[in-house]
Image: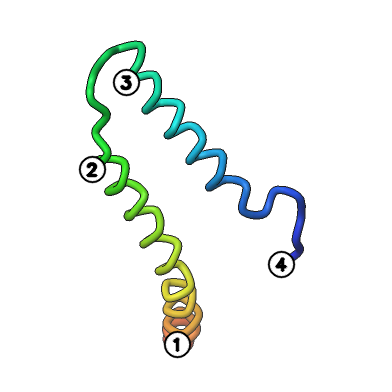
Amino acid sequence: MGHNLYDGAFIWVTLAFVALEALYIAFVRKEAYDVRQTVASLGVAVGNTLLRPLTALLVMTVLPFAARFAP
């Protein structure tokens, strides 16, 4: 896992676009921005990120075990 200039940049770019969208909806369309929807989406993204190592561990333990029984 090498480090490069772009490590971690995706979340900041995403949050910048969320802020731009909120400003556009508030000042151009003159509507209320649904913060709950944004928080829910970010919660799903964080949950997926946290569960990714568990999924990898499950795959690395189950598949080799199942491969022993494959024809």
Q: Amino acid at mark 4?
A: Met
| Placement of 48 over or under 68, stated as above or below | above
Local packing at callout 3 (Cα closer than 10 Å; few below 14, some 14-19, many 20+) is few
SS assignment at label 4: loop
Asked whether disc 3 touches disc 1, contact meaning CB atoms under 8 Å apart, the reply is no
SS assignment at label 1: helix
Q: Residue at x 53, y 47 (%)?
A: 11
Q: Residue at x 33, y 20 (%)?
A: 25
Q: CA distance from mark 3 to mark 2?
A: 15 Å
Q: Give the farthest residue toward the top.
A: 28
For marks 4 and 2, give the one nearer the viewer.
Answer: 2
Q: Position of residue 61 (x, y in %)?
A: 46, 85
For marks 3 and 2, give the one nearer the viewer.
Answer: 3
- Horizontal side, residue 12 vs residue 4: left or right: left
Q: CA distance from mark 4 to mark 3?
A: 41 Å
Q: Amino acid at mark 2?
A: Arg
Earlier residue among tags 3 and 1? 3
Label number found at residue 65: 1
> Residue under circle 2?
36
The image quarter containing residue 52 is: bottom left
27 or 42, which lies in front? 27
Q: Amino acid at mark 1?
A: Phe
> Residue under circle 3?
26
Asked whether disc 2 touches disc 1, contact meaning CB atoms under 8 Å apart, the reply is no
Q: CA distance from mark 1 to mark 4?
A: 27 Å
